[in-house]
Amino acid sequence: MIKISERLGRVEYAIRDIILHAREYEKTGKKIIYLNIGDPVAFDFKTPLHIKNALIDALIHDNDYYTDSEGWSELRQSIVEKECGKKGLDLTPSDVLVTNGVSEGLDMVMGSIIEENDEILLPGPYYPPYSSYAKFYGATINEFKIFNDGTPDIDDIQKKITGKSRAICLINPSNPTGEAFDLKSLQSMVDIASEHNLYLICDEIYDEIVFDGAFYGIGKVAKDAPVILLNGFSKTYSMTGLRCGYLCMNNRSRQLDSLRQNIFKLARVRIASNFPVQIAANAALNGPQDHISEMVQKLQKRRDLVFKRLNELDGVYCKKPKGAFYVFPEIDLQNKWKSDLEFVIDMLNSTGVLTVHGSGFGTSGSNHFRIVYLPHENLLEEAMDKIDLFLKNKILA
């Protein structure tokens, strides 16, 4: 075989890697209940009609040529109005880069700031692509603690910052836990980033999907800190397969000037983001927003159902998520399983319920598993019945 790069072996993505086991199970002809991927459109959260119509209209009127590499100017202005006007981050359109999904934006940021042997600080547990992209570009991961009340352990962060540290990353609300940071926690993170000359990368893709209390964005406390905001349209606007996201660089931060001057080179190399989808994304931001509250109401009922059922199970402990659409229960392996991965595979093969092993979200995720509660209540009840019977049979065995 011809040699591949060593860095490719550093990449893993538990949420989709676990599907390889599901494909083997599918060969038996048995039904699978997929609770592993956070795709609203795969369930009963369809792309709003005005967004679909904007996409169709763009194609009908031949607006499917290359647009500006940085992103369509009208969409960039609409993003400024949301992230600056509504959420408080200081921006101009020149601080915004439209990407093919948040993942591309994360890839661009990591590729722009990391050198071999640098270090990136991630909250434990964390969304896997943050680790994979960082490792791909040569960094190592320092995982910092999150207390049970959802606040970051500031002392732990301070201890883990070294001369090789380059960035602190946050996902708010969190994937996989659904935890949301309060303003005090965000302010502490901003202060640390400024003090140590670190990038503060904050992913707010679930900013509109919050159940208990208000959502606080990093823009409210950013001031002149080196904050890079990531956001997109996949979740709130049910545009997962259309792939549109963006990154924003705090206009007040002079520490970001070099990044601001150079990251657009990557945008030009990849030519441009999908223009018709950008037109649809602009319609999403400027059109009716009623579907968001309807989505949140439905998700809150499903969250409450799964949270209640999980905490009725022996050997399972679960915190109530504040946002997003994931729950991250802890499981007592009871010497029945060697790892949470073995537990998840055993549960799949025994019940047809596909979840994701917690260790795929970092070392802090060990002895956990992640459930997506996007499906209708009837399907969630069926899945929980199967998990309940599975655990009872295993414990009695």
Image (tube, grey):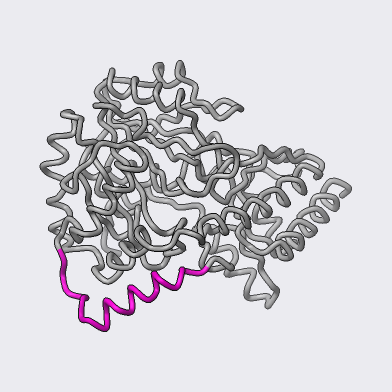
Q: Is residue 261 left or right of residue 250?
A: left
Q: Nearer the viewer, residue 369 or 199?
A: 199
As for residue 66 lying within the magenta part, the answer is: yes
Q: Is residue 165 above or below residue 268?
A: above
Q: Is residue 111 above or below residue 26?
A: above
Taking the view exactly as shown, the residue that stands out farthest to the right is: 396
Question: Most extreme residue toward the bottom, as rendered?
Answer: 60
At 37% from the left and 67% from the top, the residue drawn is: 242
* Residue 6 visible to an observer of this rendering: no
Q: Position of residue 5 (x, y in %)?
A: 27, 53
Q: Nearer the viewer, residue 345 or 321?
A: 321
The answer to which of 199 and 213 lies nearer the viewer is 213
Whether residue 285 appears in magenta in the rendering, the answer is no
- Residue at x 57%, y 38% (from the top left corner): 365
Q: Where is the N terminus found, in terms of image quarters?
A: bottom left
Q: Residue 294 appears in which quarter of the rendering?
A: bottom right
Seen at 18% across and 61% down, the residue is: 270
Quadrant of residue 386 within the rendered picture: bottom right
Q: Please tell me whether residue 348 is drawn above or below residue 170 in the rendered image.
A: below
In this rendered view, identify the residue nearer to me: 31 or 137: 31
Q: Horizontal placement of 219 versus 329: left or right?
A: left
- Going 14% across and 50% down the picture, which residue do you hit? 264
Residue 276 in sight here: yes
Residue 26 higher or lower than 231, as above or below: below
Q: Residue 314: x and y, percent? A: 82, 41
Q: Which residues are magenta?
A: 46-67
Judge from the rendering whether residue 74 lies leftward or rightward of residue 351; answer left or right.
left
x then y, percent, for residue 356: 58, 52
Give the number of callouts: 0
Q: Position of residue 51 (x, y in %)?
A: 39, 69
